[in-house]
Image: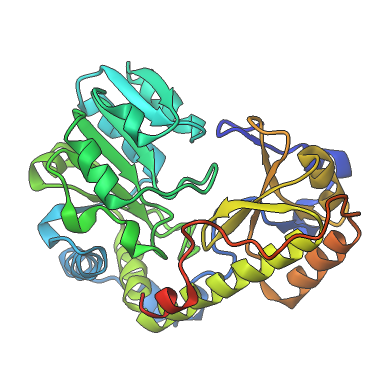
Amino acid sequence: MDRDGRSDAGDAAAGTARADRIDLSVAVNRSPWPVADLPPPVRDTPAPRATAADRLTGIAAGRFGCLPSQIRMVADDNRAVLSRIARLLPAGRAAVIAPGRDSYAHSLRAAGWRVCPVPTPLAMAGADLAVVVNPNAQDGRAWRTGDLIGLARHVGHLIVDEGLADARPDLSLSPALPANALILRNLRAFWGLAGLRLGLVVAHPGLLARLSDEPAPDESALRIAALAMADRTWTDDTIFYLAEAALRLDRMATAAGWRVAGGTHLFRFYDTPDAAAAQRHLAHSRIRVQRFRWSDLRLRLAIPRGRDEWDRLGDSLRKIQAGAPSQRQWRCPGFPSRAALCNV
């Protein structure tokens, strides 16, 4: 198990070599924004930091629906930023969604906070700090902005990790930013730029001022992030493809006897008769998927990339003997309709 509650047992059981496997275990777009296609002068030529930073801030503000003054760029991932914020605020009781990222709870405890896992935001009222991941990579749940705005009125501070919300702008709290909220964004998941050392924090200027000592991204990271976030054609095409691909993956899984248990554009959750056995079965086809210590049934699969990955996954799923009766095509509750996606 890793510190976020995930199991790698399937890899060990099959001796899966990293170079030869299809890794569907991570909540990252496997068809990333094509940074490699940029000519070297665009990627590598130095530019004034202020120019690159201002351009990215303007693009991000337009995408998030907030003011440029409400954005600060940092050279850390969301976990590192949360750890920094936790040390800047007076320690007290921190409510976190369970199941959730164990690494967040670990960072809070290390900063002196008393961590209280709760099942929903409704149970967070009265906490000195509430931490919500929206959507939640551990179970696929998502919460409406109205619920989070209401929550902000009943907690000291609210941190919302929106690292998986880029394909669902309707979930973002940024346009109605509460005075005590901090929103964490990055380009790791939707854009697939896991190696880009750049994150964005959305908050009112008074809160952002507390992060003034955070290391800033370099010019290259700022420039690449601005180009990626400004690429509306790629964004729209990717949202549409991922939505269609998610439904395709659901059909394949239900044909194997699994039940759709939620998900996002980037990954899907399925309840299986035996998650450990299903994980081992897929590992023998050199496919890595995620299971969790809190469930004996549930698996998480990212959206495959390219024909080879789809074919290999399809072949492996067809070998699974479906023990359940034929099921109707499932649809994840809250997953946008095709018509809604076209208007994103």
Count of residue discs:
0
Q: Is residue 298 left or right of residue 31?
A: right
User: Where is residue 254, by image quadrant?
Assistant: bottom right
Q: Who is closer to the viewer here, 49 or 262?
A: 262
Q: Residue at x 30, y 31 (%)?
A: 130
Whether residue 60 can be seen here: yes
- Location of residue 260 in the rendering, given as x and y in whole percent from the top left corner: 65, 54
Q: Who is closer to the viewer here, 204 or 123?
A: 123
Q: Residue at x 17, y 47 (%)?
A: 203
Whether residue 74 can be seen here: no
Q: Who is closer to the viewer here, 217 or 181?
A: 181
- Location of residue 123 in the rendering, given as x and y in whole percent from the top left corner: 35, 28
Q: Is residue 110 left or right of residue 272?
A: left
Q: Residue at x 21, y 29 (%)?
A: 155
14 w.r.t. 186: above or below: above
**Image quadrant where one finds the N terminus:** top right
User: Where is residue 212, by image quadrant?
Assistant: top left
Q: Who is closer to the viewer here, 38 or 12?
A: 12
- Location of residue 337 in the rendering, given as x and y in whole percent from the top left corner: 47, 71
326 w.r.t. 343: above or below: above
Q: Is residue 195 left or right of residue 91?
A: right
- Location of residue 160 in the rendering, given as x and y in whole percent from the top left corner: 32, 43
